[in-house]
């Protein structure tokens, strides 16, 4: 089993794509103990996407996996996640280097 | 900025049509001279209100959702009208979250219930961040 699997959320994480991303995260969880959710390239995140993200984090937690979220400070995703206080639930990283450092 | 500048968009009652609203509203706000951060916040808030109106109408008479955006000298105003009323006090996954986030992106958000129909007014200052 790999140390960490990275899911690169490029594009939209919204009503129309959230189910596809949940499936990707499920696949990543089957290969690794740590799952990195990289939101740096998210162009649009809506409430359905945030809701899905909460579900993904809960599912990973339930499987005994360790989730790490990458959401750079200047990004769109970070703005929403801070409004929702997500940093209290999961570690928010600036970069993959930072995320994987913690995983090693 | 042109004070009479107005953008109108009418959506059919299905979610697949909504991403087009994002693209068109974003392009129009940019053309109207609204800065990038404000544009993204307004597009987000408008998207959430429209997604909510399309997803959750109760007994809509004819289900149409119309958005009118206006750029004035001090801010952007977006009015979303739909023909269905909203569920009061019925918690549904995602819905409360969407309206809460939309409210956080603008300076003012008000919801007026008509019979039938609902009107949501969003106002965001173009003077800087909320």
Image (spheres, rainbow, N blue to C red):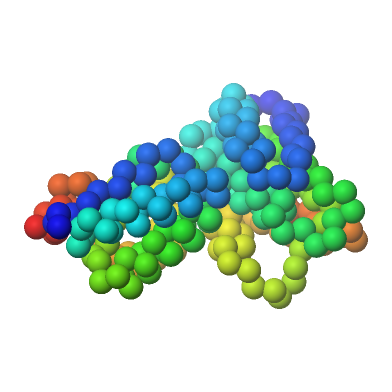
Q: In the rendering, at what x and y percent does residue B117 appear?
A: 85, 56
Name the residue at the left extreme: A104
- The percent position of residue A97, horizontal first and vertical second, equals 15, 47
Residue A51 image offset from top left, x and y in percent = 49, 61
- Drawn side of residue A37 relative to residue B20, left or right: left
Residue drawn at (11%, 54%), measured in percent from left and top? A101
Residue appearing at x 72%, y 31% in the figure: B7
Q: Nearer the viewer, residue B110 or A49?
A: A49
Q: Residue at the spot x=58%, y=27% of the render? A: B27
Instruction: Return the residue nearer the eye: B129 or A19.
Output: A19
Residue B24 placement: quadrant: top right
| Vertical side of B15 occupied by B28: above or below | above
Q: Is residue A48 visible?
A: yes
In front of the other: B69 or A40: A40
Q: Is residue B118 left or right of residue A13?
A: right
Query: Is the C terminus of chain A in the top left, top right, bottom left or bottom right quadrant?
Result: bottom left
Q: Can you give x and y, in whole percent of width and height, for residue B103 in the image? A: 59, 58
């Amino acid at each position: 089993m790999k140390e960490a699997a990275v899911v690169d959320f490029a594009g939209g994480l919204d009503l129309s794509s959230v189910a596809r991303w949940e499936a990707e995260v499920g696949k990543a969880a089957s290969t690794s103990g740590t799952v990195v959710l990289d939101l740096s390239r998210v162009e649009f995140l809506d409430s359905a996407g945030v809701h899905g993200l909460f579900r993904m984090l809960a599912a990973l937690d339930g499987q005994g996996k360790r989730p790490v979220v990458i959401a750079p400070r200047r990004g769109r995703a970070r703005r929403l996640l801070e409004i929702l206080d997500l940093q209290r639930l999961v570690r928010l990283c600036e970069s993959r280097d930072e995320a994987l450092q913690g995983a090693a | 900025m042109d004070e009479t500048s107005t953008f109108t968009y009418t959506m059919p009652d299905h979610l697949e049509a909504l991403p087009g609203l994002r693209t068109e509203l974003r392009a129009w706000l940019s053309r109207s001279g609204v800065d990038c951060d404000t544009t993204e916040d307004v597009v987000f808030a408008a998207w959430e209100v429209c997604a909510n109106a399309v997803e959750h109408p109760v007994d809509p008479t004819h289900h149409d959702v119309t958005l009118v955006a206006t750029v004035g000298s001090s801010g952007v105003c977006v009015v979303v009208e739909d023909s269905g009323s909203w569920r009061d006090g019925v918690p549904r996954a995602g819905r409360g979250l969407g309206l809460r986030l939309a409210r956080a992106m603008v300076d003012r958000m008000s919801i007026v219930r008509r019979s039938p129909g609902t009107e949501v007014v969003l106002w965001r200052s173009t003077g800087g961040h909320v």
